[in-house]
Amino acid sequence: MQSFFYFAAHMFNFFKKNKIVVAIDGYSSCGKSTLAKDLAHKLKYVYIDSGAMYRAVTLYFIWNKIDITNTSQIEDALKKIDISFKRRRGHNSCYLNGELVENDIRSAEVSDQVSEVAALSIVRRKLVTLQQAYGVSKGLVMDGRDIGTVVFPLAELKVFVTADVDVRAHRRYSELKNRGNEIPFEDVKANLEKRDHIDSTRSDSPLRQAEDAVVLDNSNLSPAEQLEAVYKLTKMYL
Ligand code: DC
């Protein structure tokens, strides 16, 4: 039923032609959020960080000591979770049940557990439905792991971002350091590799490149260069 409505909405929007959905997928810390944010800003589109939604659910589970092997506890908890985004200081910030959690969801504790939570089908079902609702009126850039394959399989433009694992680990290390989180480089890299492994080998919606995605290796690209490359691609549809 849900897919029928999504398909109908897609056909309706197809004829409007002016706004599109851009799906950006890729490994952890490959710069896809920066790209998605910059592109949404340039196109004056809405930007949604789907990873933040999985992080918010993980945070709720940590705060409320939910046992992730207990399905009925998870079902109950999911009914009590409301995730929203609001603009704050020029950025889209994540709120969990009305509380600003943008910093809490980036903690090492959440980063450590989020892949296990994101591998749960029951969690994915809830979040995918919420994510699809953001795309109904188009004008959306969303980044994640399954955006081009599961959430918006009919997105006009799909980009699969990759970068060398050491480059990614250095980016994440600097990002954490700038936020005052001094975590050894080797630990940061190990966390990335662990998440990549879980994200790409889970049975439900594993991270993979959609067949019709454009691959962007940004190991040697600046944020401005990657933005320019993808912005050029969007022009074909606008
Ligand atoms: O992009 P991120 O690192 O903030 O994502 C956090 C986790 O959520 C990551 O381990 C993969 C998972 N995720 C997912 O499974 N599907 C998405 N669409 C987005 C994120």
Image (spheres, rainbow, N blue to C red):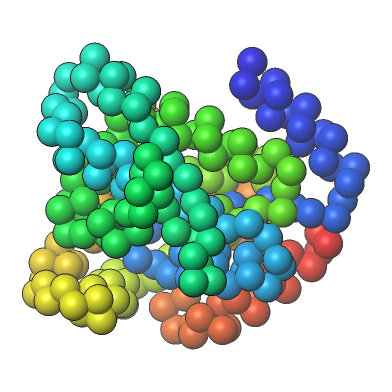
Q: Position of residue 45 (x, y in %)?
A: 68, 60
Foreground of the two, 186 or 103: 103
Q: Quadrant of residue 97?
A: top left
Q: Is residue 145 visible?
A: no
Seen at 35% across and 66% down, the residue is: 29
Figure quadrant of the N terminus: top right
Residue 162 % position (x, y): 43, 65
Q: Quadrant of the C terminus?
A: bottom right
> Compared to 168, does 78 lie above or below?
above
Q: Residue at x 69, y 29 (%)?
A: 6
In the image, taking residue 102 as reference, residue 89 lies left or right, namely right
* Left or right of residue 71: residue 235: right
- Residue 224 x, y percent position in the rendering: 56, 84
32 horizontally vs 106: left or right: right
Q: Residue at x 84, y 35 (%)?
A: 12
Residue at 53% over, 30% down: 129
* Location of residue 84 in the rendering, given as x and y in whole percent from the top left corner: 47, 45
Image position of 140 with respect to 122: above or below: below
Task: Using the image as rendered, state which of residue 95 and residue 230 is in the foreground.
Answer: 95
Tell me if I can see residue 64 in this picture: yes
Single out the residue that lies furthest toward the right: 15
